Each structure stands twice: as C-alpha cells, then as structure tokens.
Image (cartoon, rainbow, N blue to C red):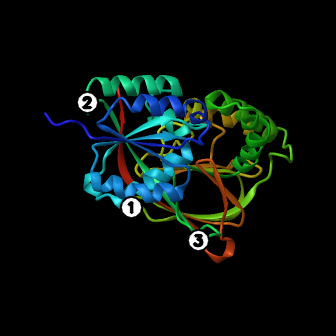
Amino acid sequence: MSQTRVCVISNPTSGNNRKWQARIEARLSAYPQVRHYVTRSPQEAEEIVPQLAAMRPDVVAINGGDGTIAAALGMILNHWCADNLPLIIILPGGTANMTAGDIGTASTHRRALQRFFRWLDRGAPLNGDIRERHIMRVEGAADGHARYGMFLGTGAIMQATKFAHKEVHSRGLGGEISLGMILIRSVWGLIRQDPRFYQPTHVAMTLQGAKDAPVTREEAPMLILVASTLGRLFLGIRPFWAKADAPIGVTAIRGGALRFARAFPSILRGHPNRHVTAQNGYESFHAERIALSFEGEINLDGELFATAGDAAPLVITAEGPIRFLRPR
C-alpha cells in the first residue's frame, strides 16, 4: 500500500502558533514523509503553493488562524485541478479559530495537534470524518484584490470586531470563550442601542440561488449582515434558517428591527421564533452568488478591508466544494 503524502503549512505568527511553533517543527521533523512549509505572509504562501501542487500530496494540513486557512484554500483552488484537490486538515493555530470550530481536527490547538500526530503514527489513513464545505471568493475591494473566506460580515459585526481587537484579543484572550465574551457585550450594546455598537450600514444586495430568480433588496440600513459557508459558527451558532439549497448562508437584520431582544437568541440557534419575520426586519437566504453595494468596511475571516463603494459592488461567489478530513 502506498504511503500517504502529507504536507503541512504553518503560519508562526498566528495566535496559538506563537507558543507552539518550535515544538511543532521539532515534532514534525520526526516524520520524514511529511513536508513542512512555514509561511509568514500571503506572498510567501503564494510562492510555495505551486510547489505543493507539483508534489500532488494526498493531504494538506493548514496550521493557522482563519485568515491563513482562507488564503491557503484560495491558493489551492487556483493551483490545483478541481477534480484532484487534496484532502484538507485544519489545525486551530490562530486566535479566534471559527473555521476550525466547524471543520477542524479538535476544538483546542493542543488536542488537535495530539490527534494529528496520532493520525500520522497510524500511517495517516484517509478514512476518517470527511466533510465538504465551499469557500467564498470575494471581489470588489477598494484595493482591487480578490480574497477568499468562509465568514463575512458588516454592520454591527465591524463594531464587534473593533471591540474584540481593542478589549479582548489585545489581552491575549482567544478561542470560543473570547468570542462568547464579544458576543455578549455586542448584543447588550445592540439591545441598548449603544452608539458604539448600534451603527447600521446602508446596503443594497442581490442574491442568486441555484434555481430561483435573483432576489433583490433595495438599499436599506443593515444592523447585521453576515454570510458564511460554514455549517456552524462559534459556540454552535447557526444563524441561517432558510432552506439550504445553495452553499452560502446569508442573514440580514435591518436597522430598527422589531423585538430584537426576543428575536435574536432564536436566530443564534437557527430556530427563529414568531418575532423573526421579514416584516419585523429579519431575513435569511441561501445563495451561490451575492452582490453587495455599499461604502464601508467588511470583515472576512478576521481581515478588515474597505469596499469599492460606488465604483463596484462587492461580489461573493461560492467555489469548491473542498473536502476536509477530521482524523479520529
């Protein structure tokens, strides 16, 4: 039986990796069949991914945060044949690690590494828990660069992100506990309409599904707008309740949405109660392509960037699917 070909991509500047990188490198050196690439920037990753594609590994393990994972997956899609993509293993080496919470090897970095090395010790079998997810390609940023990600948000998401950077992550807190703290503080600010959090963004959007005619919403103040290809967000949140007939889940909550304090907890569970209606300002969709027209900032897997505003819409398309292996 042929040996499983494994490559590992690590970003040593990601949150958890700052503590673990030296030990990871030392441990991986004991496996001569594993090629380990260390990259500190998208530019460095862009240089090594074509080399990986030429090697045709069976598995690529990505050891980094949400941004590193998204960038690496986008490069893999660009350099591999669509019908010959490697299996992907996610190791939560970052700070928030929301992607790893859905399709990662384990919930913590330590446990994920232990499971990964046990998998290598068993000969790296390819028969595990395999899940498929799409990734979003995002075009229309002010800088003209195309990006990839699995979670996107604007509106109150931006205020929550800035609060996270200033008050939570800067103190060394990470993982789902930190995200829960950010969620609680942000929701309390929205309920009280605290201007530090309650800042609706005016957005117009068009959504194209697999079969149905496009859905268009005229420009309106959006309190929260999120899109994702993940099956769950942090803490098991599943905020998309529309029929899943396309890869990208989208939820939009308008500024001034009624009964917010009573409606929002049910949205987080993915089981909207009687207050969650379009008339009250709550909508959810699934789409293959989304066009957003607005001027402002967006959060894509933790990276903040500006849209092109009136110059061009932000266009989000689903690519993939990609298969993710969760070693047992």
- Determine which of the numbered discs, if any, sits on residue 125 in the image: 2
The answer to whether residue 313 is visible is yes
Question: Dot 2, how many residues are within 10 Å of its Cα: few (below 14), some (14-19), or many (20+)?
Answer: few
Q: Quadrant of the N terminus?
A: top left
Determine which residue is flagged by label 1.
Answer: 78
Q: Decide which of 277, 264 is in the foreground and name it.
A: 264
Residue type, mark 2 in image: Pro
Q: CA distance from mark 1 to mark 2?
A: 26 Å
Question: Dot 3, how many residues are within 10 Å of its Cα: few (below 14), some (14-19), or many (20+)?
Answer: few
Residue drawn at 72 percent across, 30 percent down: 181
The percent position of residue 319, horizontal first and vertical second, equals: 40, 57
Of label 1 and label 3, which has the lower sequence position?
A: 1
Q: Describe the element under mark 2 as helix, strand or loop.
A: loop
Residue drawn at 55 percent across, 53 percent down: 41
Determine which residue is flagged by label 3.
Answer: 144
Q: Describe the element under mark 1 as helix, strand or loop.
A: helix
Residue type, mark 3 in image: Gly
Residue drawn at 31 percent across, 47 percent down: 86
Q: Describe the element under mark 3 as helix, strand or loop.
A: loop
Residue 142 picture quarter: bottom right
Of label 3 and label 2, which has the lower sequence position?
A: 2
